[in-house]
Amino acid sequence: MRTVLVLQHAACETLGTIADALQRAHVRTAYIRAFAGDPIPTHMDEAVGLILMGGPMGVYEQDRYPFLAEEMRLIERALAAGKPILGVCLGSQLLAAVLGARVRKGPQKEIGWFPVLLTEAARADALFTDVPPSFIAYHWHGDVFDCPSGAVSLARSELTECQAFRYGTNAYGLLFHLEVTEPIIAEMVRTFAEELREAGLSGEAIIQDAARHLPELERIGQRVFHAWTRWIEA
């Protein structure tokens, strides 16, 4: 059975609806829990793809989190081998950094439910062609990056110019969270409660808003992640 490597950086940030798409495509997942000390593979070996999940650390904190540098070397090898790659939040930042973009703190944190606008290029993209031109997405990030050189910008928000990009045909970075489910959101609010307090934000309000925005976001996620699994099948 085909296997995708999943680099996980926080216990609460799991695959969510990505797992549903992988299951439908008969793809097995192998979690590498970097936050728990799991060793980062040095090569992709027989894995057919690489997924990089979110987390509270920054790409520029490699002194504090040495595994980030190891992950970036693995990303380089996956790119060189033409393996499908999907980076979510921190994962998109790691992918962008490997491609030469500078990851930095944004002017303010973008946490909660905010609109995402697709670019003109997204209309012809294999993952986003059937997605509405704008929708409400779930965000939880303080770092931003410019669209990497040679990549195609796919989405932006009012606060963040590059919210999604594609490099080549099958490497994607999504800064916003398209994969979340109700339990994941609740667990993120609980796990990162101190960050919410520092930002003056209400976790209760974020959870309440999920009832309004999550059903449509999950439908969009199903389309996007199902389309990404086609690269694995190819």
Image (cartoon, rainbow, N blue to C red):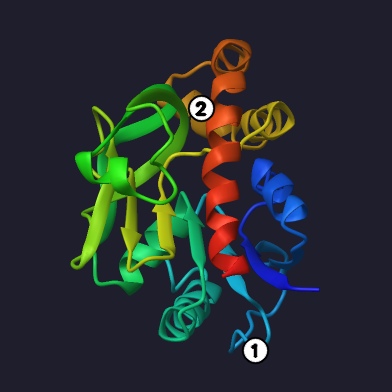
x, y percent for residue 18: 65, 48
Q: Residue at x 45, y 33 (%)?
A: 139
CA–CA distance in space, label 2 to label 1: 40 Å
Q: Which mark is residue 196?
A: 2
Report the amino acid beneath label 1: Asp
x, y percent for residue 23: 77, 53
Asked whether, in this view, residue 2 is left or right of residue 53, the answer is: right
In what quadrant of the picture does the N terminus appear? bottom right
Q: Residue at x 74, y 63 (%)?
A: 27
Residue count near mark 2 (Cα–Cα under 10 Å), binned few <14, some 14–19, many ≥20? some
Query: Which is nearer the N-term, disc 2 or disc 1?
Result: 1
State whether residue 55 appears in this view: no
Q: Which mark is residue 45?
A: 1
Q: Residue at x 70, y 55 (%)?
A: 22
Circle 2 SS class: helix
Asked whether, in this view, residue 185 is left or right of residue 24, the answer is: left
Residue count near mark 1 (Cα–Cα under 10 Å), binned few <14, some 14–19, many ≥20? few
